[in-house]
Amino acid sequence: MPEKQQKTEEDHLAETRDAMISAAMTHVPFDGWSEETFHAAMRDSGVAMGLAHLAFPRGVLDLALAFHRQGDCEMVQRMQTADLASLRYSARVATGVRFRIEAIPDREVARRSITFFSTPHHASEGSAAIWGTADLIWKTLGDRSDDLNWYSKRAILSAVYASTLLYWLGDESVEHSDTWQFLDRRIGNVMQFEKFKSGVRDNPFFQGFMRGPGRLLERITAPNPRGKNELPGFMAEKR
């Protein structure tokens, strides 16, 4: 029989994160993302304090971000196994957003997360998390842009995701059908913007602009991949 592969330290930390996120879900709707929730998650999951702080060095902030990344992973897994090739490109993007929202286990958890990441102290981390979600959707769909489009696509999709999430929180329609119609309309706006950009490039005024002051825009490139989702450099400096 082949020997069982020994677990690495990262394997143990991943298990710790999963256990504490799962335990936190029963407390977040009542206590939000708070120190009370963090300590309750430790208690309920049986994770020792030292290990908990090793897995989440910044405490509840890292716990909330790990919960967000867990939803991102579920979204990517669903996108990779779904038959997206049969859909129009706009529908593929919309499906990614829908899968991400459907990965949220409870609307009250979503409300508490929005409240937590809306505070001035955590707003930059919340923006980075949403940016990371948009980045993963484009990457999973095979986006290869490496210029200004890299930023515009992710900025626009971040706004689409955030607005659709807020709409979903108040949607009482059957199977959230109103939310998905709202999403389709927002994605339609994204595709119209892409068409607008294509058309404007053929405009003589725009061509003249790009030969002059607009040359700076051509120097903008996507950040080098580092194995994780990050804000673009000029935004990361503000964090």
Image (cartoon, rainbow, N blue to C red):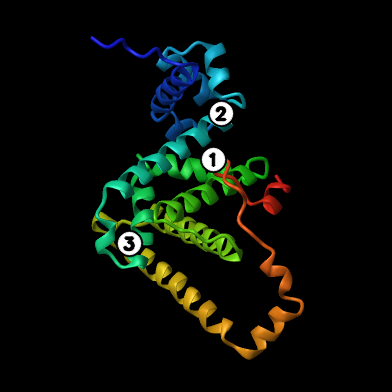
Q: Residue at x 50, y 25 (%)?
A: 37
* Nearest-to-viewer mark from 1 and 3: 1
CA separation, marks 1 and 3? 29 Å
Question: Which amino acid does the dot numbered 3 rest on?
Answer: Trp
Closer-to-camera residue (45/107) = 45
For mark 2, give the secondary structure: helix
In the rendered image, the quadrant that contains the N terminus is top left
Closer-to-camera residue (16/81) = 81
According to the image, label 2 marks what residue?
Answer: 60
* Disc 1 packing (10 Å; few <14; some 14–19; many ≥20): few
Closer-to-camera residue (238/118) = 238
Q: Residue at x 31, y 56 (%)?
A: 172
The outermost residue toward the right is 213
* Nearest-to-viewer mark from 1 and 2: 1
For mark 1, give the secondary structure: loop
CA separation, marks 2 and 3? 32 Å
Q: Residue at x 32, y 61 (%)?
A: 180
Question: Which amino acid does the dot numbered 1 rest on?
Answer: Lys
Q: Is residue 64 above or below residue 224?
A: above
Which callout, 1 or 3, points at the residue further toward the start of the chain?
3
CA separation, marks 1 and 2? 21 Å
According to the image, label 1 marks what residue?
Answer: 228
Which callout, 1 or 2, points at the residue further toward the start of the chain?
2
In the rendered image, the quadrant that contains the C terminus is top right
* Disc 2 packing (10 Å; few <14; some 14–19; many ≥20): some
Which disc number belongs to residue 180?
3
At which x and y percent is residue 191?
43, 72
For mark 3, give the secondary structure: helix
Q: Is residue 161 above or below residue 47?
A: below
At which x and y percent is residue 70?
42, 36
Question: Which amino acid does the dot numbered 2 rest on?
Answer: Val
Q: Is residue 34 above or below residue 52?
A: below
